Amino acid sequence: MASVSLPIHSLATATLGVPRIGPRRELKSALEAHWAGRLEETALEETAAALRAAGWARQHALGITQIPSGDFSLYDHVLDTAVMVGAIPERFGWSGGPVPLATRFAMARGTSSAGRSPDADGCGHAGHGGTPREGGVAALEMTKWFDTNYHYLVPELTGDQRFTLADTKPLDHFLEAKALGYHTRPVLLGPVTFLKLAKAATPDVNPLALLDRLVPVYADLLARLAEVGADWVQIDEPCLAGDIDAPTRTALHRAYSAFARAVPDIRVLLATYFGPLGDALDLAVSLPVAGLHADLVRAPGQLVPLVERAPREMLLSLGVVNGRNVWRTDLSALLDRLEPVLATRRSDRIEIAPSCSLLHVPVDLAQEDDLDPEIASWLAFGVQKMEELQVIATALQSGRDAVGEALAASHAAVASRAASPHVHDAAVAARLAAVTPRMSRRESPFADRAERQRRLLDLPAFPTTTIGSFPQTAEVRKARAAHARGRLSDGDYEHFLAEETARAIRFQEEIGLDVLVHGEFERNDMVQYFGERLSGFAFTRNAWVQSYGSRCVRPPIVYGDVARPKPMTVARWQQAQALTRKPLKGMLTGPVTILNWSFVRDDLPRETVCRQIALAIRDEVRELEAAGARIIQIDEAALREGLPLRKDDWPAYLDWATEAFRLSACVVSDETQIHTHMCYSEFNDILDAIAGMDADVISIETSRSHMELLGAFRAGAYPNEIGPGVYDIHSPRVPPVEEMAELLRLARERLADDQLWVNPDCGLKTRGWPEVRAALANMVAAAREIRAELSEAAE
Ligand code: GLN
Ligand code: ZN
């Protein structure tokens, strides 16, 4: 870009929020040191303040004019909002006054008598929270933030809930920034979305009905912000991208009218994101707010109606740079769409922004030295996205010539990606084009298959198995790290893995499990392991994204056509199966889960990418079967996570997602048993789709709800076999035999005997061996007890 002096433009740029974790996960290190008792609270706060200051400085240096404050959090912004309004459940022992940091962390992580918190969890990505500790206090539940891979803590509200301004983070951070010379725009989670995300302590309470008690607390905070000099405040109401009913519409009207009346000095930018406003567009533009942010990446078609219908005085924040993905924006194409809009609207009524907070993308591409330079040239992380915002704003304000070089670079990246042989593989395209419906159907219906499989496998009633992984001990992780750094040779690492596997198999035989697993000692992560072996995937070194609290993930980047150059698991399966006469499951991750936990290319429909991955997994399934595997498990831990925000869009997603699963699985003969696993149990609303996957056996999470969730599967509704988890692997507790036997009896009330399998809730990788040994021995004993009851009844 020529350094001509650009005119000072009134066209603003904003980020809506930036990553909190720090370029090198500094927050993670500080939090974990603090929890381990190695870092004082004041030192933690200093680290956090330094990260905020660096974030503001970075945005300022990149020319962002509307810099947010209050978007930072030590753990989670929904938790912070609960704390801010004093929604702290009684069990945390808060009785007014400033909320201690320890209370906030107790809400996030729970406490135990031993002082350790329950962060660990078997499911690769999501934590659950909510598991009570013996002698401790249970954390708030944790769940996914809309359709992202970020998790928030679910506020708990009671019918007689009182709200009070218990914490003033937005005010404190505004002042902190002000002291550093930044005039920021504070960010709040809106009261309506807050209530809609909350959970009632008892079923008779409707959180939204608490709105009138909550609004004054927000109004009080807004007034205080005005007093210290804030003029604009960003209030996020992402619930507007979901299904909103009449009470929600009324609530939005009431809340924002109340703010406009109570605090006329504060201008509110109402931020929506993650999807089109759809029907809610008219509502949004009619609210008494000074500005509206809309996601124009997920919903590009919204641009014209938005501009036409919004009042002339309303500031429109145009979310045009993707805040959810890592690709560079095609800037010229974007400007083609934006320029006509600007012709009709004053530039001081326009702001250029990412589609949503930059929380969901990694910090800075400059930290990736190892990435293939060609692939890197197509990418934009947080810093690069801010640069794009600046280029767009300048081009709109001063003409494209003012940013000619930047536009040329963007164009070159787009062109290189479109033409790159690394992206486009003719063989993959040809194979995809040749896919027929027949390929995603088993040969025979389930009942016929089941009969043949039973004959061949000859398993006892209520067969016992595990979900796949065994404890990833410090030793296992050390060996893997040493191997990755080249300090352990391939041969030595293989030897180590073979020993671990052999030990796991001996253990499973000793305690008498019926269907064995190899233990997954070679896998760091259920997606990464496969991504590293498939073409079309790239991996980063530092591109971390917050998952929850101190937990970060480094999603793989699917940049090109996906294929499987060679077998990924077959040799290890063979090696393990050779050690036992019992059937050993082949263990794979399914296409939908691989897709949902990756950054996915944006030049193909997601379903096409998913189908490519399905074909690659299908190759592996075929070869496992050819090698002799009689049972193959294809995990779809993240299938539910991909559900669109609006129910109307569910059927289309479920159609292609379940079809992709079947495409990966249905290459086998009737005799081969396909299993799948899902780490949750909310199936009521998607049971048809789950049944449509047509896996012979599905294992799910149910122990924590005492099999209640099996209601959905009640006899008839779900025809195939099911392993409802009888052992909650999220807790180190060893369930006694009788407890698991009782759960099995409950399961028998709901399902047919020949439908039932016996297994834990999820993989055991986060657990320790002593508890796993004890718990699985008890599980096998429980299954035997139930078998005995079955044969007594038959006599
Ligand atoms: N097979 C995987 C394991 O046992 C499944 C993990 C998961 O469902 N998240 O670890
Ligand atoms: Zn699981």
Image (cartoon, helix red, strand yellow):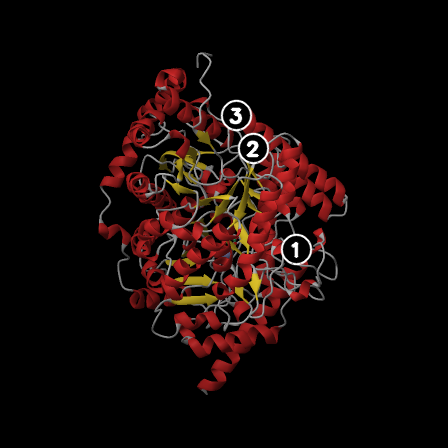
Q: Distance between the residues labelled 3 and 1?
A: 35 Å
- Marks 2 and 1, the one that precedes in the sequence: 1
Q: Name the residue under label 1.
A: 166
Give coordinates of residue 109: x percent, y percent. Answer: 64, 55
Q: What residue lies at 27% left-to-right and 64% top-to-bottom?
A: 445
3D distance between C-alphas at marks 2 and 1:
36 Å
Mark 3 and mark 1 lie on one chain; the one further toward the N terminus is 3
Q: Residues within 10 Å of mark 2 (few under 14, many from 20)?
A: some
The tag on residue 62 is 3
The reply to whether the C-beta atoms of the residues labelled 3 and 1 are less than 8 Å apart is no
Single out the mark in the foreground, 2 or 1: 1
- Check if mark 2's residue and mark 1's residue have beta carbons within 8 Å: no
Q: Pick whichever, 688 or 10, lies toward us.
A: 10
Tell me where residue 538 appears, x and y as whole percent. Answer: 45, 33
> Disc 3 vs disc 1: which is toward the camera?
1
Q: Which residue is drawn at 52% across and 77% down?
A: 786
Decide if ligand 1 comes within 8 Å of the CB at mark 2: no
Secondary structure category for the residue under label 1: loop
Task: Give the residue drawn at x 46%, y 68%.
Answer: 757
Give the residue pinned by disc 2.
542
Residue 85: give x, y in percent of width and height: 60, 56
Left or right side of 175 for 654: left
| Placement of the N terminus among the 4 image quadrants | top left
